[in-house]
Image (cartoon, rainbow, N blue to C red):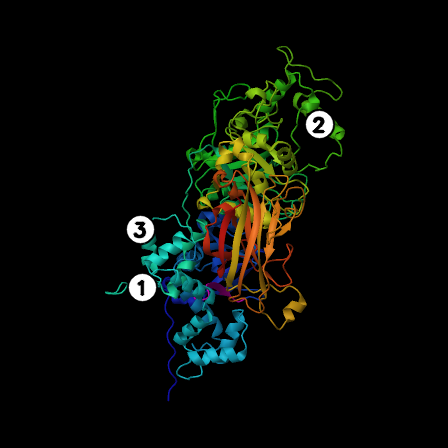
Amino acid sequence: MADPQPSPLPALDVSLSVPEEFKTGAVFTKINSDRKQKQVKFRLDVDQGQILWESKKYGAILVETIKEFRTGSNAAYDLAQLGLPFSDLPRFISIIYIRSGSYKTLNVLAPTPEILRQWENAVRALYTTRRDLMRGLDNVEMREAVWQKMYWKGADAGGDNKLDLKEVENLCLRLNISAPPAVVKKLFDATDSQRTGFLDFESFKQFVKSIKRRPEVDALYAQICDGSPSKIFDSQAFEMFMKGQQQSDLSVDALKAIFAKYATQPVEGQVPVLSTTAFTTFLLSSDNAVTASASGSHQVTQNMSHPLSHYYISSSHNTYLIGHQLIGESTVEGYIRALLAGCRSVELDIWDGGDNEEPVIKHGNTLTSDIPLRDICDAINRYAFVASPYPVIISAEVHLGLESQDKMVQVLKECFGNRLVHDENLLQDGMPKKKIDALPSVESLKEKFLLKAKNLYVIDNAATSLLATSTPPATIEVEEPSDTSDSEAEPTSKVAKVRGEIKSFGNKLRATFGSKKGSRPTTPSNDQRPPKPKMSIKLASLIVYTVGVKCRGLPPATPIDGVQSENAPHYEPEHIFSLSENKAKRMIKDDMLSVIKHCQNHLVRVYPKGLRVNSTNYEPHEFWAAGAQVVALNWQTTDFGYLINQAMFQENGRCGYILKPPALMDFNAKLLTQRTMHFFDVMIISAQQLPTPKRSTKSELLKKNPYVDPLAEVSLHVPDWSSTPFIPTESKAAYSPSHKATTTEPTSSRKVSFKTSIVKDNGFNPVWQEEICLPFDCLGGRESGMMDLVFVKFVVWQKGKDDDGDEPLAVYCAPLGCLKSGFRHLPLHDSQGSQHLFSTLFVEIGIRDVA
């Protein structure tokens, strides 16, 4: 008797987009970073979602890890860096992807431009399919088909389109399913109804259905049916569930439309109902996403007609670096990566390029490499508005003489053209002819570049004005030096602080007015004016809405008798000052309301202190809570500060601009002085298909038991906006006091956390069903919008590796105010922020007010 023929695999739509010759393999020329070339056969594995090639190291790319395809003019810079002739450009492609948290590049030359076009289209089709599966949890049938084919092909070691018992046991091992051999054999025999000794694809799907059964969802389904008047999961039961547990504000008609999307097809005489499978599908879908961003929506949902100062702006510090602050490499890649991820403020550190040379970008007084300013600007211009159409602020530290400043202006104008905001109508003293009452809206600045730099003409006028007042120099607050020279030494006494300010003020006046050391500055008169600052008027014309000035202190938020003192510092709407994290922290601690009031109409930039030589980050929500908009981070470091930043700017279509909470935009002092108390209630129910932990030590690599022993942790990270945290004694929470932000002090937030028990030997479908109650306080309650500045982090750890210094199995982070209540599946990511394709955490969440 002939063996039964194995069932054919169902074809995915993407298979139709991948020519057969690319599946079996096409020979391209691979170029390494050392410029060595080699003929290599590349295969596209549709089922596994990979680009494969033979390699001694690791010849595979998961297509969902691809960050960018570069061809044509976008690849010209890469081509030149590899020393290839420009004639090769039509058949050259550079693919940027991530492996183990690091950016990698695959550079190849196709035999002909036409073959390159076909191969690129095939890879893009495969990439699009996998990307769409990660954008929300929609299209469950497609997700299931991709999952089945990926694991079927991986399990079929013999390549004969059938699985024997041993192959099924290995599959369970790969899926992190810890089950005794007898249990696996029982399931295998139950599925192998024909007693053939193997599973064909149809039998395999039944086997998968058995192991993927969700008893915790079955229990919830039964509970909903029991609470329904009809005792079935009909439209009425669905509406009760959505209005009750899920706290949905959708209309009845909208809920009926969602129900119809998942319910059984109407049959005469029968009421449409949701089956347990359909209910599971709904719970995993974008119709039940935990946030708007988790639904896969890239729509801008906020009003973009507010002035610039009303938005948080996704910002990068030392964008040109991709590593260490002192010895790292300066490269255009830092700008490309940041801009494609939605960053809207990048930094340029501009230095003289030498005789007859254009300026360069480098990290001054360090061993980092330099790169031509023109190369950086070309890259910025190409990538600035790919991810978002909203304005990009170029924060420039200019270390140039007059002649080089004019060269810089020429480069900026040639690269950015009409996109560069400028004002040619300046007065002879470099000041604008017309004053503005408020900053322009984000919407009006679409696809524009704003140059932020110090305008020495403005600083000159401000210093002259200061000298004309009777205010003693010791009381003037002078801006700290930039982070490249900031020693971050803290004064040990008030006397030391005053002495330091006097000395700093004197040095700055001498630098501005050219007076000799020991001479006393005199009040300028018509006969004796200070020398003109060494600044090009052409450069001044490019600094329009983001004019860098020194921080001279802030006027009080609530002046005495409602009248502001004549000696109070004044800033025009376009003035922006930069603060190191240390100084920003001190100002917020001394007078948070004045900082909030100032940030209502003015931009403030905060940057990491100079001691963060390893490019670590602070937690940015500490400064967002005070209204600071341009809170710059080291994007090359994917630590917790970076994770918070990414979580914040996932919202509003990932456009890089987020409206501040109403209490900060309108400066409601009454609301901002009210402290409300709440509980974040969480039930950690279960996890699905957790990744296998990385093995770094020899003992881990030799460990026979590869199963995951997971535990989950939930933590709230609350800005330090009150002196005493809300921690009731009856809470189950484990409270961690104000702690280090990521690596170094001083900026930190309160952490309230709780960990579940450990589930042994199960990374496939561990179930906890553990309730957690985390207390926290907020300014102004729910209506203030300040809950958007409290961040919640869900982490799944491997047993024994559950400290902050360890790498988690998976993580999810979001603003607390953006979370939807009820039963939700959280899409899990790795520690670098890349989403795991099939990994989720099933939770029930809600926020409870304390009476």
Q: Quadrant of residue 114?
A: bottom left
Labels 2, 3: front one: 3
Determine whether, in the image, residue 188 is placed left or right of residue 82: left
Dot 3, crowdedness within 10 Å: few (<14), some or many (≥20)?
A: few
Q: Position of residue 29 (x, y in %)?
A: 50, 61
Which quadrant: the N terminus? Answer: bottom left
Q: What separation in Å lies between label 2 and label 1 (alpha carbons)?
A: 74 Å
Residue highlighted by disc 1: 264
Q: Which residues are magenta?
A: 46-54
Q: Earlier in the sequence, mark 3 or mark 1?
A: 3
Q: Earlier in the sequence, mark 2 or mark 1?
A: 1
Amino acid carrying label 1: it is Thr
Amino acid carrying label 2: it is Glu
SS state under label 2: helix
- In the image, which disc is placed on residue 253? 3
Q: What separation in Å lies between label 3 and label 1 (alpha carbons)?
A: 18 Å
Residue highlighted by disc 2: 501
Q: Position of residue 379 (x, y in %)?
A: 50, 43
178 up-or-down from 713: above or below: below
Q: Are marks 3 and 1 in contact (CB under 8 Å)?
A: no
SS state under label 3: helix
Q: Position of residue 267 (x, y in %)?
A: 25, 65
In the rendered image, is residue 92 in sight? yes
Dot 2, crowdedness within 10 Å: few (<14), some or many (≥20)?
A: many
